[in-house]
Image (cartoon, helix red, strand yellow):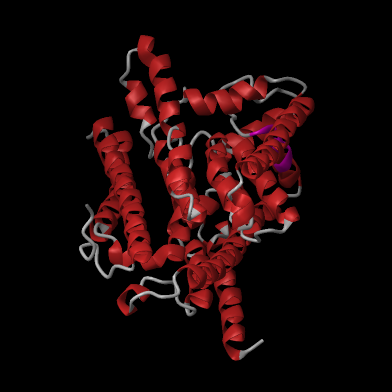
Amino acid sequence: MDRRGAVQAATLVVMGAIGFTLRLPSLSPGVQRFVEDRVEFSVPTNAWRRAAEGVFLHESGVDPYEGDMYHETPLCLIFLTKAKSLGETFLNRLFPACDILTAICLYFFAKNLVEAMIIQQRKDYASLKPKVQLLLTPFEDIPKVPLAVFIWYILNPFVIGSCMAKTTSVFTNLLLAAMLLFTSFGSNPVARVASLVFLALASYQTLYLFLLFPALHLYLMTSVPDKQRSRLWYELGHLVVNLGIFGVTLSGLVIFSSMIMGSWTFLRGVYVFAVSSPDLTPNIGLFWYFFTEMFEQFRTFFVCTFFMNVCLYAIPVATKLRHDPPFAIFVLLILITIFKPYPSYGDVGFYMSLFPIWRRLEPLMKQTLIVSVMLLIAVVLFPVLWKLWIIAGSANSNFFYAITLVFIASQVFFVCDVTLAHEKRQWQLKNNAETLEAIHLD
């Protein structure tokens, strides 16, 4: 290992130790109590108090899915029951350890992806103009980008707060990071199967993540030689195989869960709940206020409409960005976070940590300042308006929902801006154009 590699390894160890320490509840018990009560971190589908209630009911011989409190999966229930039996100390270290493991997976995913991007661009863009070459990913990004991704995740306050609140988003993020890591290994058949299995596990834990399958399939296809990929029957065969592995794994998890619980009641408590969103506890999503104000006779129609809305983006986004499937996965993660019923800061922090991979898009982005300011305002005002509404009683739900719309709008602006910047960059590279005005389209 050279000196630069040793320095980077030492940096990873130090930052990992700092990240682990920051996530320990004993370091700041007051902060832990604060984030546990915050609706920005804890929602009905990931809150630790609901998970602990489910574990208690399960240990008492009561089906936790009979009520309206527990909405985690049966395998998560068994896992948390075992973890809780090992003591509070083990539990307090389990969540930080999972978060550090997630950061490590993201580090190696970013490293593999940047290396693959550099190899691909050397093959596709060998004769570009000097100014256009500035858009390419330089070799210096191989050590810098993975380290930036690692640090962004380790020190991200959204992720730290989500871990301190012991939300199960920590486990979902770990499964997603493992999926991305194994996908980045390319043509390795074991890694291909593992990536599909981890996507099935993530979808089992959080229903809406099945929408990543089209982009993941295209990502796996990038390791297939161009001659074989151009054959329709070959691509259809791969689609059937990948869909089969994903579908069989997910179905197996559901069937195994029914065997564990001795019934199928968990389907209503986990997946029907995730779609119908009957719990209208305020959060940073769109659903709760909208359905609070809606007449009951229209509820089913709009539930179906909202579900179709989030599902609508999967195939078009994957198709449009088929030449860059990792970026398609990044965009879909943002869209899922925006439009699913119970988003949290843990979801936002995860996709934010991936942005350094595409940091070369930043000069082409036009709304960075607007997005940053809106995001900062929303984060600051969330607890303020919640206190005015719930504790002081001097405000109402409209105030809190207004800042929720600002937060969601910032994410919408961000995903539109970064996608447009990506398409600008691809257009300039493809046409060897120094500016968008350099080529006049007919």
Position of residue 49 measured from the top left corner of the image (x, y, whole percent):
56, 38
Question: Is residue 232 rendered to the left or right of residue 281?
Answer: right
Most common secondary structure along the magenta stretch: helix
Percent x, y for residue 193?
Answer: 72, 48
Query: Residue at left 63%, top 89%?
Result: 2
User: Which is nearer the eye, 223 or 409?
Assistant: 223
- Magenta span covers which residues? 73-79
Residue 382 belongs to magenta span: no
| Left or right of 84 on screen, residue 409 | left
Q: Residue at x 56, y 78 (%)?
A: 11
Q: Could you tell me residue 436's position as x and y percent?
A: 24, 62
Measured along the vertical axis of the image, is residue 149 above or below residue 416?
below
Taking the image as drawn, is residue 396 in sight?
A: no
Q: Tell me: residue 189, above or below residue 46.
A: below
**Residue 355 percent coordinates (x, y):** 43, 60
Task: Please tell me in which quadrant of the rendered image residue 341 appears.
Answer: top left
In this rendering, does residue 183 appear at all?
A: yes
Q: At 48% across and 22% down in the image, what residue appears? A: 276
Name the quadrant of the N terminus.
bottom right
Q: How many marks?
A: 0
